[in-house]
């Protein structure tokens, strides 16, 4: 019988090894039938996959899960997974989930069908404010220092919002400023130009608040208009935004 080097190729050797392994496992006949139909390249690929799986088992087995890892701050993978589950159970609030609601006791006449409160709730993009700012002085007592509170600052609230094409929010803000300071130089009454502003955190809509059955964190402030900023540009095709600033009228009503 002539020597045939193809019988001793790497693919043939791997095929014989794969058959021998399959004969020692359950379903040996089915495995042998499948192996006999594979090409040498397919047999070699299957062998590599099995070998890679064994290597992964050695690396990511029970010993790996319980071994402290410097990439995880010294925690084991099991401890890191439990920390992730705890964070998920805490349900962190998303900064995009909020809504703003304005209650105007003396709404200006902007024409039929115009509702500035609804437009603002729908198109508000950003809200920023400091709910509490305490002021104080440092008093020297010998060689030590002690803090002495002197009061608190009014809440400043800034709303960045879009507007509709007819400028409902622009017209509303201008009208509220006219109610505060008329063109003849006289001042209006606070109940005429002040508004209640409610900022609700963690939920995007009042209907979601009612459905959740929980009381989210919110701030209710009696405020007056301060300034509005318009920014227009022909260098880009983007949605127009305006920045409205309000200040707290008094701190007796609270947040």
Image (cartoon, rainbow, N blue to C red):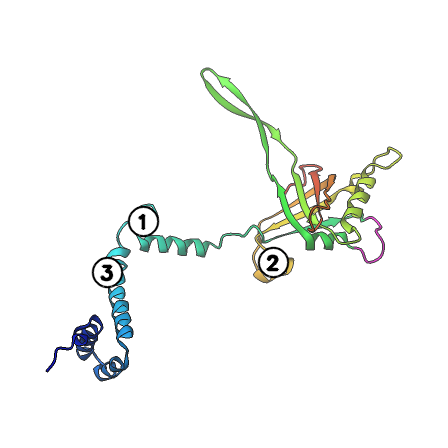
Determine the residue positioned at 71% across, 49% down: 240
x and y, in percent, of residue 163 in the image: 73, 51
Residue of label 1? 75
Q: Secondary structure at mark 3?
A: helix
Residue of label 3? 58
Residue of label 2? 209
Determine the residue positioned at 69% across, 51% down: 237
Quadrant hosting residue 130? top right
Q: Residues within 10 Å of mark 2 (few under 14, many from 20)?
A: some
x and y, in percent, of residue 63 in the image: 24, 57
Asked if residue 67 is among those painted magenta in the image, a careful observer would answer no
Give the spatial CA distance, label 2 vs label 1: 38 Å
In front of the other: 122 or 105 = 122
Outermost residue on the top side: it is 142
x and y, in percent, of residue 51 in the image: 24, 66
> Horizontal placement of 220 versus 50: left or right?
right
- Upstream in sequence: badge 3 or badge 2: 3
Above or below — where is 69 with respect to 223? Answer: below
Q: Main secondary structure of the magenta part?
A: loop
In front of the other: 20 or 85 = 20
Give the spatial CA distance, label 3 vs label 2: 50 Å
């Amino acid at each position: 019988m002539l020597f045939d080097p193809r019988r001793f190729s790497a693919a043939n050797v791997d095929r014989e090894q794969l058959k021998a392994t399959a004969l020692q496992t359950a379903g040996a006949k089915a495995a042998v039938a499948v192996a006999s139909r594979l090409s040498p390249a397919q047999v070699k690929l299957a062998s590599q996959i099995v070998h890679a799986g064994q290597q992964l088992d050695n690396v990511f087995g029970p010993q790996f899960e319980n071994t402290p890892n410097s990439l995880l701050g010294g925690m084991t993978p099991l401890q890191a997974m439990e920390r992730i589950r705890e964070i998920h159970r805490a349900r962190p609030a998303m900064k995009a989930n909020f809504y703003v609601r304005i209650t105007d006791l003396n709404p200006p006449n902007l024409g039929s069908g115009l509702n500035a409160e609804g437009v603002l709730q729908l198109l508000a993009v950003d809200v920023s404010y400091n709910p509490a700012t305490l002021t104080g002085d440092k008093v020297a007592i010998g060689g030590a220092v002690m803090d002495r509170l002197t009061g608190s600052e009014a809440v400043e609230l800034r709303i960045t919002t879009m507007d509709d094409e007819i400028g409902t929010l622009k017209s509303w803000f201008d009208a509220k400023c006219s109610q505060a300071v008329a063109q003849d130089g006289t001042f209006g009454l606070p109940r005429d130009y002040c508004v209640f502003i409610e900022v609700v955190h963690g939920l995007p809509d009042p209907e979601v608040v009612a459905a959740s059955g929980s009381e989210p964190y919110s701030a209710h402030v009696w405020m007056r208009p301060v300034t509005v900023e318009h920014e227009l540009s022909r260098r880009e095709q983007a949605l127009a935004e305006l920045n409205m600033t309000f200040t707290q009228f008094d701190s007796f009503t609270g947040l």
